[in-house]
Amino acid sequence: KIADQVREKKIEGISDLWDESNREGMRVVIELKRDAMADVVLNQLWKFSDLQTPFSANMLAINGGRPEQLTLKDMLSAFNAFREEVVSKRIKHLLKKSRNRAHVLVGLAIAVANIDDVINLIRRAPSPAEAKVQLMARDWPAKDVAPLVELIADPRHKVSDNGTYKLSEEQASAILELRLARLTALGRDEIGDELKKIGEEIKDFLEILGSRERIVQII
């Protein structure tokens, strides 16, 4: 089309042009006449050729629940804010999921640390429901588990000043559903290793939620 414009004398000052486009991108080389002024030729290209093409866009958008006419900068800013919100919600979901799993593991760790007392309590209980009530009512020694509780930083977990811990209903149910084989030294190590891994994940999630810079990096 530029060549047609040159032949029709709409664009002057061009002596030759050729296409050097390839798989890596588009490239058009324009050679000027000796007495031509580059800026003048460029302005003619903007005006008469498709080197520059105007188009309209409807910049009406729902922003913060309200319809607004946005500028391009406003549109990009709103989208970035939306992405930050999405990432934050995802991290909060992962944090909740990890804390829920850690909550169960803390209960299992308590059971493993007090294996003999737990088994005797379950044997003496007249029913699983009563065993659950008794598990929740008792203050369990938790000194060995205290570092893991601190690591996972869950507000629901609290070791008392005298080093004991009360089980929740969810934790007591998990203990009753646990196979006896897991209540061995090997099971204790497995639970401890998983708790440590989840604790590191939770620590990272909390750092992300507390740092806009981390969220922007994720985006």
Image (tube, rainbow, N blue to C red):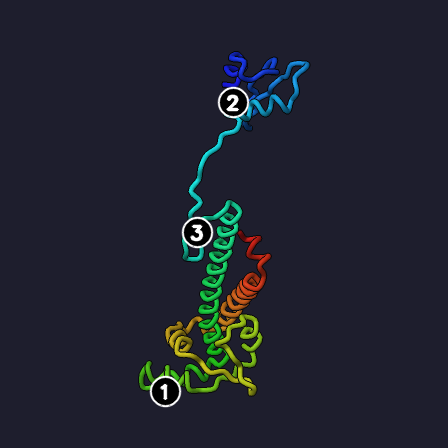
Q: Is residue 131 visible?
A: yes
Q: Earlier in the sequence, mark 3 or mark 1?
A: 3
Instruction: Tell me the CA gap for discs 3 and 2.
Output: 35 Å
Q: Residue 29 at x, y = what percent? A: 60, 20
The kind of secondary structure element at disc 2 is: helix
Instruction: Tell me the CA gap for discs 2 and 1.
Output: 94 Å
Q: Which residue sits furthest right? A: 34
Does residue 18 appear to the left or right of 100 in the view shown? right
Q: Earlier in the sequence, mark 2 or mark 1?
A: 2
- Tell me, yes or no, whether the two marked residues, 2 and 1, touch with CB atoms within 8 Å: no
Classify 10 Å Cα crowding around label 3: few (below 14), some (14-19), many (20 and above): some
Does residue 71 appear to the left or right of 126 in the view shown? right
Q: Residue 109 at x, y = what percent? A: 49, 75
Q: Residue 9 at x, y = what percent? A: 54, 13
Up-down relation of residue 95 to residue 2 (above or below)? below
Classify 10 Å Cα crowding around label 2: few (below 14), some (14-19), many (20 and above): some
Of residues 158 and 20, the one drawn nearer to the viewer in this rendering: 20
Disc 2: which residue: 48
Up-down relation of residue 97 to residue 147 (above or below)? above
Displayed quadrant of residue 134: bottom left
The kind of secondary structure element at disc 1 is: helix
The kind of secondary structure element at disc 3 is: strand
Q: Residue at x 44, y 69 (%)?
A: 100
Tag on residue 124? 1
Instruction: Tell me the CA gap for discs 3 and 1.
Output: 68 Å
Up-down relation of residue 64 to residue 131 (above or below)? above
Tag on residue 68? 3
Displayed quadrant of residue 31: top right
Amino acid type for the residue under numbered disc 3: Glu
Displayed quadrant of residue 212: bottom right
- Tell me, yes or no, whether the two marked residues, 3 and 2, touch with CB atoms within 8 Å: no
Q: Residue at x 39, y 78 (%)?
A: 169
